[in-house]
Image (cartoon, helix red, strand yellow):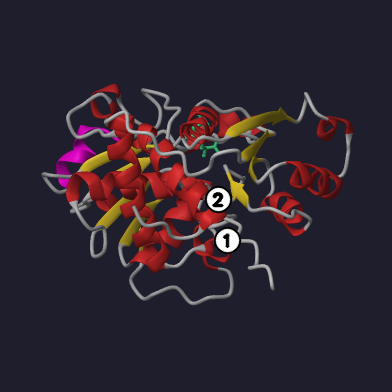
Amino acid sequence: MTTPPIKHYLQFTDLSAGEYTYLIDRAALIKRKFKAYEKHHTLNDRTLAMIFEKASTRTRVSFEAGMYQLGGSVVHLTAQGSQLGRSEPIEDTARVISRMTDIVMIRTFEQARIERFAEFSRVPVINGLTNEYHPCQILADIFTFIEHRGPIAGKTVAWVGDGNNMANTWLQAADLLGFTVHVSTPSGYEVDEQLAFGSRTPRAGCYRVFDDPLQACRGADLVTTDVWTSMGYEAENEARRQAFADWCVDDAMMAVAQPQALFMHCLPAHRGEEVTAGVIDGPQSVVWDEAENRMHVQKALLEYLLLGRQAG
Ligand code: CP
Ligand code: NVA
């Protein structure tokens, strides 16, 4: 008997549009059961290892609580608290951890580092954020959009701010799932097409670049942003503070979006920098649903990577 190949989730493009349709439906069912206090122990006796080489609140809690709710258990490692912080090669770490656990989630710096881990892992590996991508967050954001507004295909998402891991992943999702991203970044902080699409030619019209963030928001169904300085780039803090001053989502930007437009932010947020308090705490903001939904979509993802499609 041949063993099926291991399925990793290192980038948004690692799953197909059909697999996303399944995952979104499955996450909705898992969320309904959670809200009704119904048991959903599909991962009894399975163990998730979580490796954090950067800080986290949402990713840690959503994966940890989610895995327990699926009947499994978790092991939590940090760089400082493990031999990773004392230069044990990532390949050796992968060989060891993947002999003792069933699935691994990693938050780290370069994408190349998680790819090296995955290459030597016997079990599925999930990207919990790298410098280049944040696929679990975009999965949660799309689920949240669909929950509030229905299908995202054909819709417009305005990205205001840094051309970072979130922006790259939004572009990958737009290409795959048939929506458009309006991107506005300060000069010098543009998205990198190579990171978003590799050697593939993106679907025509899947994204448009705007110099003016207000124009990017015009007619958008969703306006979204992120911190000016991502983890790992703190040395650039002051330069970024100056460059990003006009990339603050405010009432004027929300006013030119669709009247029903939503506001999202992956969090943590800095009120008064990338978004005003009025917008993030206002009626169009769905940031708390967005954060909660990390847990529901990731439960569906963990289950899918370990068990494949499930009925009921
Ligand atoms: N959005 C997100 O990934 O949050 P944390 O950094 O708190 O995990
Ligand atoms: N772009 C941010 C997202 C944090 C969840 C970062 O990488 O720090």
The number of callouts visible is: 2
- What range is drawn magenta here? 249-256
Contact between marks 2 and 1 (CB within 8 A): the answer is: yes
What amino acid is found at the position of numbered circle 1 in the picture?
Leu
- Camera-near label (2 vs 1) is 2
Q: Which element carries disc 2, helix, strand or loop? A: loop
Question: Could you say which is closer to the camera, residue 103 or residue 111?
Answer: 103
Residue 90 visible in this rendered orientation of the protein: yes
Task: Verify whether residue 250 appears in magenta.
Answer: yes
- Residue 197 rendering spot, x and y as whole percentages: 52, 67
Q: Residues within 10 Å of mark 1 (few under 14, many from 20)?
A: some
Q: Which residue is mark 1?
A: 195
Q: Residues within 10 Å of mark 2 (few under 14, many from 20)?
A: many
Residue that appears at 29% across and 28% down: 280
Among numbered discs 2 and 1, the one appearing first in the sequence: 2
Q: Which element carries disc 1, helix, strand or loop? A: helix
Q: Main secondary structure of the magenta part?
A: helix
- Residue 24 rendering spot, x and y as whole percentages: 34, 53
Q: Which residue is mark 2?
A: 133
Which mark identifies residue 3? none
Is residue 248 placed above or below 29 in the rendered structure? above
Residue that appears at 38% across and 34% down: 39
**Mark 1 CB near ligand 2 (8 Å cut):** no
Q: CA distance from mark 2 to mark 1?
A: 9 Å
